[in-house]
Amino acid sequence: MDTHIKTWAESAPRLVAVAAGRDTANLVVQGARLVNVHTREILDWQVAVVDGRFAYVGPDAAHCIGPGTQVIDAQGRYLIPGLCDGHMHIESGMLTPAEFAAAVIPHGTTTMFTDPHEIANVLGLRGVRMMHDEALMQPINIYTQMPSCAPSAPGLETTGFEITADDVAQAMAWPGIIGLGEMMNFPGVINGDPQMLAEMAATMNAGKTVGGHYASPDKGIAFSAYVAGGAADDHEGTAQADALARVRNGMKSMMRLGSAWYDVESQITAVTEMGLDPRNFILCTDDCHSGTLVNDGHMNRVVRHAIACGCDPLVALQMATINTATHFGLERELGSIAPGRRADMILTSDLTTLPIEHVIARGQTVAQDGKITVDCPHYAWPADARATVRMQPLSDAHFEIHAPEGANSVTAKVIGVVENQAPTRALTAELPVVDGCVKGQGDTYQIALVERHRGTGKVVNGFVSGFGYTGKMAMASTVAHDSHHMIVVGTDRANMAAAANRLADVGGGVTVWKDGQELALVELPIAGLMSDSPAADVAAAADRMVQAMADCGCTLNNAYMQHSLLALVVIPSLRISDLGLVDVDKFELTELFEVNT
């Protein structure tokens, strides 16, 4: 399949000729109930396609049909635009762009706006370019947002590489760059940090969109200062009040349903109950791992969920098509079934349950009845992109947490995991001291961050609760947003060391250990974040990993996603980094122990 598509201007002579009946279409779809997201109507209309774009959209396309025209009889099914994901990270799927595309195309996703800040932290601007280049090779539309924050919070973490304002300015000239990725360093913006403002200025000067990320509960002056800096959207809302604050200040409220983030139901009431203008609301996934993609869906899953939350199906579709395209300045390129737009469309027999029965992208069938029908080309990832876990061998001694001299117990600060949400709680626990070392107990166990970019041998230890683990176990992952060192959580130091060393041996991924034996391994050799194996294979490994976590006592929904965010030092309240424990509410490092007895 030729993934190149001519511009509207280049195709205009043929589009006009086909619409006028002087030339014939490549494809005509008849017998459909067309969902017009511009007017929120359902019309008994037909479409004609040439050069991968809609030429004619109207009551009767018979005049566009010739001997070489493919004619599809929709048999009364609904014809809807291809679905758009307004904010997401491909790396969170554990897949490269090619394999991610192959996984989501059968679910009706034909456009994605991606922020590869995960790989930016590991491989820098070069890694972003690799993601960008593979994205442009795909048979669907994958736009790249240039990462803004690597590190996400300067002074609170150390990354493999740093992104500079010059990097951002350089990337704005790349063909697939649509804007600036989520501006996570909101304190930097609020305080007028020159680099953050320069990055946003370079983006706006290029006429592109600045992505937002405001994770603070403060909706007062600080929020106003952040919006004044130029962020045009935000996906960090978790309550109706968050959505209101965004849209009332001219931002787009991006409501996410990922593998573990369930933030649509609590915010969509701004539309369903308050009756606010739905044009300012966008649906997205943010983070979906491969198991969710293969087993549950992608943007089709989000739209179904929004409908289940009481949203009118046509409004929900607008939030996943035209609203998204308009936000990024692409409303005349995609997001609707209208003349000149890219011919991205889906046939479905029901607008509520939304079965994805036939997917067409750029005028060609790309999936049918849940099966992909096209190839998704791979980038030639270099050897050094597969050798990014640099660390010294670890022993259980590296995971010892020494108590203050003479202490019999300590009051320790504990990261509290919150099910189905990205924020954590800042908790405390009274923990015993045995042989000079602090031990976790009950639902409080150890967490460690192992430096893996430069091989310094540094290990930062702390405590976490909420997973429900029991017995002697450990889980380690080189997916550790956003700096992507290695996170190890466990109830036993020997298992923690074994899990960490295993990931060093295989070049990255996720592993679960119990009683000295490996229960599951997901190998992610590219940057320690992704696999270029087929999505089904990675999903099967991920399913085994989820089951292994359950076998260790974990009861949380999609707990892997919670695990991977324990080092995300830009979302409250308590996190861990290679520099220590981080109080995100205050944006400063904090001590592990509060009171010694």
Image (tube, rainbow, N blue to C red):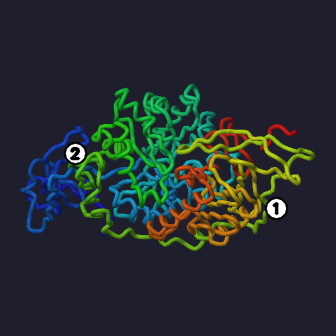
x and y, in percent, of residue 43 in the image: 16, 44
Taking the image as shown, residue 423 lies to the left or right of residue 78, namely right
Pointer 2 local density, CA inside 10 Å: few below 14, some 14–19, many at least 20: many
Q: Residue at x 79, y 51 (%)?
A: 439
Tag count in the figure? Answer: 2
Pointer 1 local density, CA inside 10 Å: few below 14, some 14–19, many at least 20: few
Instruction: Name the element at disc 1.
Output: helix
Compared to 224, does 524 lie above or below?
Answer: below
Taking the image as shown, residue 43 lies to the left or right of residue 595, namely left
Q: Label 1: which residue?
A: 397
Among the two numbered marks 2 and 1 on one chain, the one whose residue lies closer to the N terminus: 2
Q: Residue at x 64, y 45 (%)?
A: 569
| Pick the front one: 225 or 314 | 314
x and y, in percent, of residue 368 in the image: 27, 63
Q: Quadrant of residue 270 in the image?
A: top left
| Pick the front one: 51 or 294 | 294
Q: Residue at x 65, y 60 (%)?
A: 475
Three-letter amino acid code at the position of disc 1: Ala
Instruction: Name the element at disc 2.
Output: strand
Can residue 502 be seen?
yes
Taking the image as shown, residue 478 lies to the left or right of residue 106, namely right
Three-letter amino acid code at the position of disc 2: Val
| Pick the front one: 278 or 61 | 278
The mark lying in front, picked from 2 and 1, is 1
Q: Which mark is residue 35?
A: 2
x and y, in percent, of residue 532 in the image: 49, 69
Quadrant (top left, top right, bottom left, bottom right) of the C terminus: top right
